[in-house]
Image: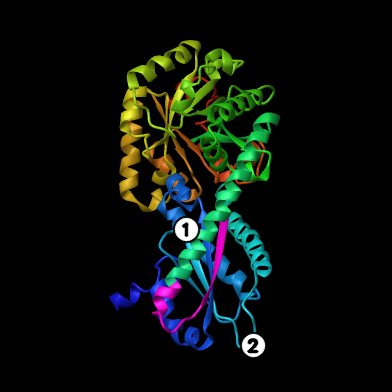
Amino acid sequence: MEHEHLLYDGVTGLPTLQAAVESMRRVIVERGELLILYFNFSRYSKIEEIYGWEKLDAVLATTAAAVRAYLHDSPLRSSRVMVRYAHDDDFVFFHIPEPGFEAAGDEQITEIISGLQKHVSERIEAAHGEDIASLFDIYAGRSHVMVNPKFRLERQIYRGVRQAVLASQSVEARETVKKLEDLRESIRTRGVYVDYHPIVVAETGEVFGYEALARGVMRSMRSPEVMFEVAARGDLLWELSRICRSRAIEGMHGRFDNGELLFLNVDPGDFADPTFSPEELDAPDPTRVVIEITERTAIKDYPKFRNRLQAFRDAGFRFAVDDAGSGYAGLGSIANLEPDFIKLDISLINCIDENFIKQNLVETMIGFANDQGAQVIAEGVERAEELAILKELGVHLVQGFFLHPAGVPSLTPEHLPIQVLQGPANHAPKLGPDMSAIKSA
């Protein structure tokens, strides 16, 4: 029984490459040829990095089901087997042409892949939201194996898979060049807009502030993760970051009318940009701007970095450590940066109602924050059960799609779920830049 389990992937239910080859051996030999398609779902590793392994498993299950459904209705629906390959973000599809029919050609394969990308992306967006769907890209390669009885069948198939992988990498390289051109055009035209995601008081549901999430106007630049990844490859991070900061600050005018705070994402590398200063930000009221240290890159010299932050503190800006508990944003960053806000990574919040260890970690962080006069923000709240346990643990502020469903652009509290807005009548203090109101709630 244990050996049988090893032949199938526990998340997607798909067979392994070895199991598929063995089950298809007779049919492949009889037909004498095999079409291999390799699908690489680029950036799926980013999903685990940002949202945690539970979310990646759910996305993989959605992906496998969507691919199976689409291929079932495609011209390749006969004599097909889909298998998991070596990593979390790739699948291999075997097609054995029926007797009397030729294997699908390049034009037909291109059409199938285009339709597959659209179908799977729609399924992922429906199940997991626009932000995760924006990380979805397919890079596909193909190879055609003509069986030679002189050679072991497994070796011929593995060589065919490797050829298909190399073909997909060539496609990815061409797409990367195109995205870099799109980014340069976006920077030239300032083609960036900002989504403002609400951060609300856990106890009362009142809006406390908004996180500015920059996106490219071009569809290829719609995902912030993709946009900044391309910028890093093209050595354009400073140029892109300047536009994103400017757009976020511009959005404060006429929108933040009730004392709400703006949470602005800034990477440690941006502080090395000689143009980045309190004057460059040009905030109408620096005390209402919180600079979130995102830490895409590590902070190597904390004393020097703290000195750089001091000019912003002196001007009235506040600071937050983003994604605490993930990547470089560990306890060292919290201790060295002395933030006003600690944003817990989504991996700690996802399914926290079912995980006592996560609950203990979050409760400990809340106690520490209370002692230091800081506030804890739980980001990535997607379910009512998560919100309920966070309120019970005493978290100060919450953020996530449960509070702001994907695709809702409004900044007004009327769009927040009724479960969030409901709360004890005697816990509705007026909130703004003065954080003491949270403590009294």
In the rendered image of this protein, does residue 119 appear above or below residue 425?
below
Residue 137, can we see it?
no
Q: Secondary structure at mark 2?
A: loop
Q: Secondary structure at mark 1?
A: loop
Q: Which residue is tagged 1?
A: 89
Asked if the stretch drawn in magenta spans residue 428, the answer is: no
**Mark 2, mark 1: which one is toward the viewer?**
2
Foreground pick, 31 / 361: 31
In the rendered image of this protein, does residue 188 appear above or below residue 108?
above
Foreground pick, 167 / 324: 167
Foreground pick, 360 / 418: 360
Q: Where does the image place residue 35, in percent across and percent down from the top left?
A: 55, 74
Residue 48, can we see it?
yes
Amino acid, disc 1: Asp
Range covered by the magenta-colored residues: 136-157
* Quadrant in which residue 338 is drawn: top left
Amino acid, disc 2: Gly
Question: CB of mark 2 within 8 Å of CB of mark 1?
Answer: no
Sequence order check: which comes first, mark 2 or mark 1? 1
Number of the label disc, if any, that sits on residue 100 = 2
Q: Residue at x 34, y 34 (%)?
A: 330
* Quadrant in which residue 16 is drawn: bottom left
Q: Where does the image place residue 392, in percent across and percent down from the top left?
A: 40, 41
**Residue that protrudes farthest toward the left in the picture:** 2
Q: Residues within 10 Å of mark 2 (few under 14, many from 20)?
A: few
Q: Residue at x 33, y 38 (%)?
A: 363
Can you say which quadrant of the picture contains the N terminus? bottom left
* Quadrant in which residue 25 is drawn: bottom left
